[in-house]
Image: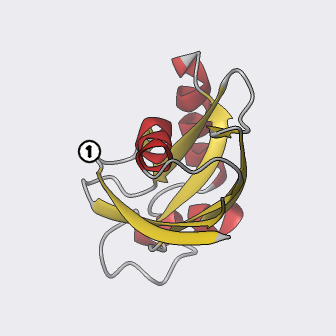
Amino acid sequence: MRQAFHEIVIATRGRGLLEFTGAVEKWLAENKFRAGLVTLHLQHTSASLLIQENADPDVRRDFDAFFARLVPDGDPLFVHTAEGADDMAAHIRTALTAVNLSLPLHGGRLALGTWQGIYLWEHRTRPHTRRVALHFIGE
């Protein structure tokens, strides 16, 4: 049984979904991991992780549009606005999604479906540097 830890740093351009499946796959391949479990943890409270379709960019646009309607920036309900009108909205969007993912690895490949990719979803409107901790356990 092997265990390993790695960190991926992702620079965002502001709100939107950024696929980083390739960075995870590269780390797994470099270490010649064959079978086990990969856990990803985003170390932030105003962005999230998700597995979503990676073929049609309209899916990403629709996610942003839906969440803009569901949790609008600058809602007068919000008291926490220390970093701007998008501050509390970003925290709520994160609470409604996830900061952790666990994926099986089998035969050296992530057990993702044909059209699935791993995304960081930046909920803030300005660019940020985000850190994703990866932990592998297996062989």
User: Of residues 70 and 13, which is closer to you in this image?
Assistant: 13
Q: Looking at the rendering, in which quadrant would you find the N terminus? A: bottom right
Query: Along the horizontal axis of the image, is 45 left or right of 106?
Result: left
| Residue 9 x %, y % | 31, 59
> Three-letter amino acid code at disc 1?
Arg
| Coloring scheme used | secondary structure
Q: Is residue 75 visible?
A: no
Along the line of sight, the residue nearer the viewer: 92 or 102? 102
Residue at the extreme top of the image, as rendered: 56
Task: Looking at the picture, tell me which residue is in the foreground, 68 or 128.
Answer: 128
Eyeballing the image, is 58 above or below 26?
above
Residue 68 visible, this orientation? yes
**Would residue 132 appear left or right of 66 to someone viewing this image?**
left
In the image, what residue occupies the spot 57% across and 55% down? Answer: 49
Q: Secondary structure at mark 1?
A: loop
Residue that numbered label 1 is attached to:
13
Residue drawn at the location 63% of the way across and 40% of the way down: 108
Q: Quadrant of residue 40?
A: bottom right
Q: Residue at x 24, y 53 (%)?
A: 127
Quadrant, the C terminus: bottom right
In percent of width and height, residue 134 lies at: 50, 64
Would you place residue 22 above or below residue 100 in this image? above
* Image x and y of residue 83, in percent: 30, 75
| Mark 1 surroundings: few (<14), some (14-19) or many (≥20) residues within 10 A | some
